[in-house]
Image (cartoon, rainbow, N blue to C red):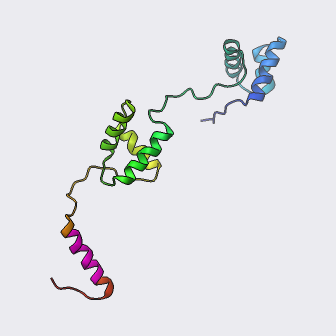
Amino acid sequence: MARRNHLDDFTRGRIIGKLEEGRTVTSVAAKFGINKSVVSRAWKAFQTTGTAVRKVGGGRPRTTTAGNDRYNILQAKRGRRQSASIIAQQLSTATGRQVSRFTVARRLHKGGLFARHPERCLPLKVDHQRHVYSGAESTKTGQLSME
């Protein structure tokens, strides 16, 4: 399949100029080596908008802004155990706009944070953490404890 390229503004302006001179769509298309449907669409767009410049950003609007994405990443780094659905709920209450957990996961992935799934095990209690860390300390120094 052929690759599609947009006409640059200069070429689009030249096409409009030729059509304003009174040339036919077919002759202008042949001169520029492009399909006549491209020329007729450019001409139709010029007649409705009054400008030869291409309108950018006709796609679906994003649910989150760049600021929201940065805030999500910051919140995810602060609360390491939060799932994507919890972060999505927090964002929805803060902005008043419904945001999917998949959207949040994609934005976090783009920010370098991965695997935001719900926590499946309970975190270690403080005394268990001390025991695990003390065992790690003793192996660093070369003393193995037989407890």
Residue 64: image location, x then y, percent: 45, 36
Q: Is 1 part of what is drawn in magenta?
A: no
Judge from the rendering whether residue 118 lies leftward or rightward of residue 104; answer left or right.
left
Residue 92: image location, x then y, percent: 35, 34
Camera sees residue 85: yes
Tell me what residue is drawn at x 74 percent, y 28 percent. 9
Camera sees residue 33: no
Quadrant of the snapshot with the C terminus: bottom left
Residue 6: image location, x then y, percent: 67, 31
Residue stretch in magenta: 128-138
Q: Is residue 121 positioned above or below 53 on the image?
A: below
Q: Nearer the viewer, residue 36 or 105?
A: 105
Quadrant of the snapshot with the N terminus: top right
Judge from the rendering whether residue 25 lies leftward or rightward of residue 126; answer left or right.
right
Tell me what residue is drawn at x 44 percent, y 32 percent. 63
Snapshot quadrant of residue 20: top right
Tell me what residue is drawn at x 71 percent, y 29 percent. 7
Please identify the residue farthest to the bottom as the structure is shown: 143
- Most frequent secondary structure within the magenta stretch: helix
Please identify the residue farthest to the right as the structure is shown: 21
Residue 67: image location, x then y, percent: 49, 40
Q: Nearer the viewer, residue 144 or 44?
A: 144
Judge from the rendering whether residue 18 lies leftward or rightward of residue 43; answer left or right.
right
Judge from the rendering whether residue 114 lies leftward or rightward of residue 134; answer left or right.
right
